[in-house]
Structures are given as C-alpha cells and as structure tokens.
Image (spheres, rainbow, N blue to C red):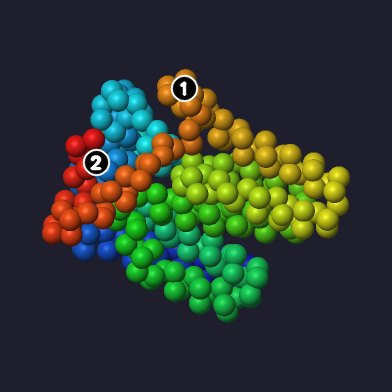
Amino acid sequence: MKKTAIILLVLFTAAFAVRLGYNVFVAGLNTSPSVYYGADDGDYDAIGWNLVSGKGYSITPGELTADRTPWYPLFLSALYKIFGRSYPAVRIVQSLLGALSCLLIYIIAKRVFGHGTALLAAAIYCVYPFAVYYTELVYTETLFISLLLLFALCMMKIKSQANSLYFLFCGLLLGYLTLVKPQMLIFFPVMAVWCFYSVSRSVKAFFKFLSLALAGFMIMLMPWFARNYLVFKEPWLMRAAAGEGVLVAINDKVYRNFNERYFISRLR
C-alpha cells in the first residue's frame, strides 16, 4: 500500500511538473485566449467572465446564448470569481487536473491489466504531447478527460459492486460530461447496456439501477434544458450551428487566407 502511494505521488508530481513547465516556459502562463468570434477558447473565456461580471450566460455581454454547453464556462467562472480573470490560474488548475488524469489512468489500467502495464500507461500519459498541450488552452479537453476517466472508474466499480449510489453517481457524471461535451448524450445507451451486464442480466435489478442512473443523468441536464426553454422557447442542449462550420471553413477566401476562416461568423 505504501509503495503504491509513493508511485502515485511520483506520477502526480511528474505529470504536474511537465504541464506546469510547458505552460511557464513554452506557452506562457498569461497568454490570452483567441479573441475572434467563434473561437472556442475565446467564447468560453467570455462566457465565464460575463457570468462573474453579472452580464449573464453570454459571449457578447447582454446577448444570452446556448452556443456553448455550461459546465466548462461555469468552471472558468468559479476560478475567475476566486482569482479574477487570471489565465495563469486556469492553466495551473488544468495542469493539476491533467496530473490527476495520470493517476486515474494508473488506477484503471491496474484493475484491468496489472501494475506493470498501468505504470507504463501512466508514464506515457505523463508526457503525452497533446495531453500536455491541452492544459494551455482555455478548452474543455483537460476537464473533460479527467471527468471521463472518473466516469470509467465508476463504471468499473458498479461491475464489481452493484451499489445504488454508484449507479446514481454514474448518471450524475454522465450528465455532467454531456454538459461539457454534448456528444456524450449518445453514451447513455452504452451505459444502459453496461448496467445490464453489471447486474448479471437480472431484469428487475437492471430497471432499478438504470432508473437511478437515469435520475442522476436528468437531474444534471434538466436545469439547462429548462433555462434554454425559458430563454429561447426551445429546450436546446446546444444551439445548432446549421452548417456554419462548413461555410466558414470551405470557401475561396479561407483558401487564400486561413486567418479569415471566421469571417462569416464575424458578419453574422
């Protein structure tokens, strides 16, 4: 037990040091996000700051939006509330989350493959270039990956111990993940199949535990749906771009000057 604790501490420290070092010496701790309309990092940053400033859930102050799902902007707003509009704080916290993901990878891999493989997987993730790079960006990826790994660990837990609280927590986590990246909405059927497999195909137990997971899932989603219905009269998860991504990426102007890829969005 003591040896495992030391290994986890070394992994966490090394992963954090790599990410912090990258942000300090390569990316720049205080580098501002993109400012053009339609840039993911610029939008998230604007929403997070507008929430703290009392200007609503908006990219442009006063113009309420559902263009971005809420949990990453809320994560930013919590940091901005504590530290001010501090990009170093965001990058340091994201470096900590990246280091936590390294530990979660070790724990998950050890349960499936054993200590040696788990150590190798965690060591690779410790220095994996994209994982390090994402901590620089005011993007969802670092938060999403850590939550996704926690969700995977929880799913493994319900396989070994069919406890009501684990199923409820899995539902809550999946709802949270969906409000970070809406693509996770389609993962609920996968979770349902896993629930069925986890309770040894008992139909009665399956419906009991699936109901708990669904309750947690909907508890997380319903406030956002209700807010969008009250504001826009439609219960959106996220406003559809309606082909805008294609328009801003594939046209003669963008071919000539890649930096003009968002000119349509700016004119919208």
The answer to whether residue 161 is visible is no
Identify which residue, 45 or 107, lies in the foreground: 45
* Residue at 51% in and 63% down: 103
In the picture, measured across the screen, residue 103 lies left or right of residue 217, that is left
- Residue 109 in the image: x percent, y percent? 59, 69
Q: Is mark 2 on a helix, strand or loop?
A: helix
Q: In which quarter of the image is residue 266?
A: top left
Residue 112 image point, x, y percent: 65, 70
**Numbered circle sitting on residue 265:** 2
Q: Is disc 1 in contact with disc 2, using a CB cutoff of under 8 Å? A: no
Whether residue 243 sits left or right of residue 163 in the image: it is: left
Q: Which residue is pictured at 28% across the width and 48% down the height?
A: 247
Q: How crowded is mark 2: few (under 14 residues within 10 Å), some or many (20 or more)?
A: some
Against 111, residue 177 (above or below) is above
Q: Residue drawn at (71%, 56%), measured in percent from left and top?
A: 194
Q: Is residue 14 above or below residue 155?
A: below
Residue 47, placed above or below residue 89? above
- Which mark is first along the chain, 2 or 1? 1
Name the quarter where the C terminus is drawn: top left
- The residue indicated by pointer 1 is 233
Q: In this view, does 230 lie above or below 163?
A: above
